Image (cartoon, rainbow, N blue to C red):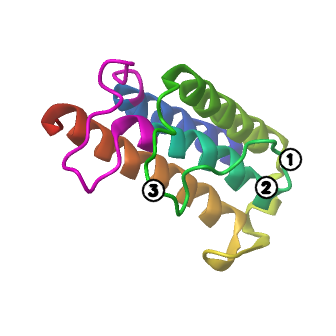
């Protein structure tokens, strides 16, 4: 049953966040809340990169390169379709991770440079929170940005 619960949680995160992700286009990707914030496209790219890079902590290899984490927005989000592809790839990686991970392994520890040692379940939930957090930023940027 645990696997089904995790898959439901993952599915709901994907549905909820897609409201933001699907609304980004080439026409609005450069919108920012103000001159000091990242553009909607940059945030989308950040999500595409990080969802895949978080997989590295679970032992899932990735060729995705970091161009956004700890970086300033210099136009990395201009290729909206590539960012959306990376997000889809990341969600598929997480789905497969849930499918392939035994229920008992979700409490096993993973060492991370950001959070220290956490359970696999905590890291999984952080990824989904991270997605939701930035989806909210995207929605706000698309509605109020200039």
Q: CA distance from mark 1 to mark 3?
A: 26 Å
**Residue at numbered disc 3:** 72
Q: CA distance from mark 3 to mark 2?
A: 23 Å
Residue depicted at x 18% and y 38%: 145
Front residue (pair 20, 4) = 20
- Position of residue 2 measured from the top left corner of the image (x, y, whole percent): 67, 48
- Mark 3, secondary structure of its residue: loop
Which region is colored magenta? 21-43
Residue 72 shown left or right of residue 36 in the figure: right
Mark 3 neighbour density, 10 Å: few (under 14) some (14–19) many (20 or more):
few
Q: Specify the principal SS of the magenta part.
A: loop
**Residue at numbered disc 2:** 56
- Position of residue 10 measured from the top left corner of the image (x, y, whole percent): 56, 39
Image quarter of residue 142: top left
Q: Badges 3 and 2: C-beta atoms under 8 Å apart?
A: no
Q: Is residue 9 visible?
A: no
Front residue (pair 48, 109) = 48
- Mark 1, secondary structure of its residue: loop
Please identify the quadrant where the N terminus is shown. top right
- Mark 2, secondary structure of its residue: helix
| Mark positioned earlier in the residue sequence (2 or 1) | 2
Mark 1 neighbour density, 10 Å: few (under 14) some (14–19) many (20 or more):
few
Q: Is residue 1 magenta?
A: no
Q: Badges 2 and 1: C-beta atoms under 8 Å apart?
A: yes
For residue 27, above or below residue 62: above
Eye-nearest disc, 1 or 3: 3
Q: Is residue 102 visible?
A: yes
Residue 61 is labelled as: 1
């Amino acid at each position: 049953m645990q696997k089904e619960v995790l898959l439901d949680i993952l599915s709901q995160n994907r549905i909820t966040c897609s409201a933001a992700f699907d609304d980004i286009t080439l026409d609005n990707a450069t919108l920012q809340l103000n001159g000091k914030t990242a553009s909607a496209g940059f945030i989308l790219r950040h999500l595409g990169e990080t969802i895949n890079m978080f997989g590295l902590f679970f032992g899932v290899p990735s060729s995705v390169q970091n161009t956004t984490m700890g970086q300033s927005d210099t136009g990395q989000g201009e290729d909206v379709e590539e960012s959306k592809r990376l997000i889809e790839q990341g969600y598929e990686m997480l789905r497969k991770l849930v499918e392939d991970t035994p229920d008992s392994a979700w409490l096993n520890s993973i060492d991370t440079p950001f959070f220290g040692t956490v359970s696999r379940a905590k890291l999984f939930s952080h990824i989904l929170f991270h997605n939701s957090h930035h989806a909210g930023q995207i929605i706000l940027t698309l509605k109020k940005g200039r």
